[in-house]
């Protein structure tokens, strides 16, 4: 059985490792070299690197028996493109959903633009952990207040520079981040407001929340897009096992 997984997430890596161990021929499509690096420990895995649009996704999907969308919960455009590609290729698609977090006590905002408008009426330093691509939404805020934590890639740092973020305010690091490390960063830069997405367990949300509570910083959370039609990792693993069993029986008959 040929399996195609979109996404360099924790769930994508976990499913890729499990699928290979079960005997599936597995290809994983990731957007960046960093995503590919995190897959290097999985043997017999084909990794495609680069941001793909629908035609290229369709070409990959046509070679698969099952496609899995294991992209980030906030990757709305990527998920829409994957759905379109799988429909065009006539290949079944399973979407991974990630359990959300408890948000009581946080300032919850529908999007980054609304969060920026809220923060404009506050005082104190702000740490943005929402990703380099979201920086434009915060362009109206005082740059001296803004600190950003982004992935250590040229693309991310270039976006920070283009947004006018001082190099001394750019924290280029790759997670996972423990509560203690988050606390150290918040204290080092005197952060009063921590802005994040709800990345759930794999995204280190609880470690951010606990760190903010510990040092007295306020948490601003960008709401997740609606995502109610997916499956858990365990459900998709079962689906893969069933397809492999069907394939095995077909060869024996």
Image: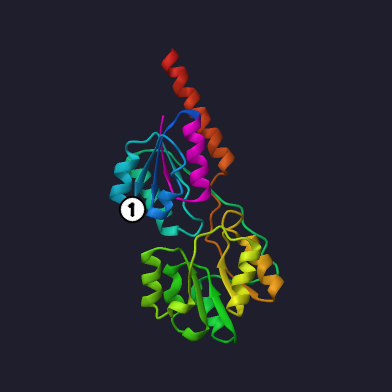
Please state the total of marks drawn on the protein image.
1
Q: How is the image coloured?
A: rainbow
Residue at 45 percent across and 45 percent down: it is: 39
Using the image, determine if residue 145 lies above or below residue 41: below
Residue at 36 percent across and 71 percent down: it is: 158
Q: Residues within 10 Å of mark 1 (few under 14, many from 20)?
A: few
What is the magenta range?
Answer: 1-21
Residue sitting nearer the eye, 235 or 11 = 11
Secondary element type, mark 1: loop
Which residue matches tag 1?
A: 50
Residue 197 placement: quadrant: bottom right
Using the image, determine if residue 221 lies above or below residue 169: above
Residue 209 placement: quadrant: bottom right
Q: Is residue 141 visible?
A: no
Residue 235 position, x and y percent, is: 57, 38
Q: Is residue 126 magenta?
A: no
Residue 59 placement: quadrant: top left
Quadrant the N terminus occupies: top left
Q: Is residue 131 visible?
A: yes
Residue sitting nearer the eye, 235 or 21 = 21
Quadrant the C terminus occupies: top left
């Amino acid at each position: 059985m040929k399996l195609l997984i979109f996404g360099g997430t924790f769930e994508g890596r976990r499913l890729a490792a499990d699928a290979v161990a079960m005997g599936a021929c597995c290809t994983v499509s990731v957007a960046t070299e960093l995503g590919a690096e995190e897959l290097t420990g999985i043997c017999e895995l084909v990794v495609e690197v680069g941001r793909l649009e629908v035609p290229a996704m369709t070409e990959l999907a046509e070679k698969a028996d099952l496609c899995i969308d294991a992209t980030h919960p906030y990757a709305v455009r990527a998920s829409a493109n994957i759905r379109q590609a799988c429909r065009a290729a006539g290949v079944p698609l399973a979407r991974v959903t990630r359990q959300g977090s408890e948000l009581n006590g946080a300032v919850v905002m529908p999007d980054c633009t609304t969060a920026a408008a809220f923060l404009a009426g506050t005082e104190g330093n702000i740490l943005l952990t929402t990703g380099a691509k979201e920086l434009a939404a915060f362009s109206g805020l005082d740059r001296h207040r803004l600190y950003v934590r982004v992935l250590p890639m040229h693309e991310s740092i270039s976006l920070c520079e283009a947004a006018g973020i001082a190099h001394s305010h750019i924290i280029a690091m790759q997670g996972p981040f423990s509560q203690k490390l988050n606390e150290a960063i918040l204290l080092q830069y005197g952060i009063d407001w921590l802005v994040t997405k709800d990345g759930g367990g794999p995204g280190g949300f609880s470690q951010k929340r606990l760190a903010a509570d510990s040092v007295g910083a306020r948490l601003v959370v960008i709401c997740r897009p609606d995502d109610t039609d997916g499956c858990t990792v365990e459900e998709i693993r079962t689906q893969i096992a069933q397809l492999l069993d069907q394939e095995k029986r077909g060869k024996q008959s």
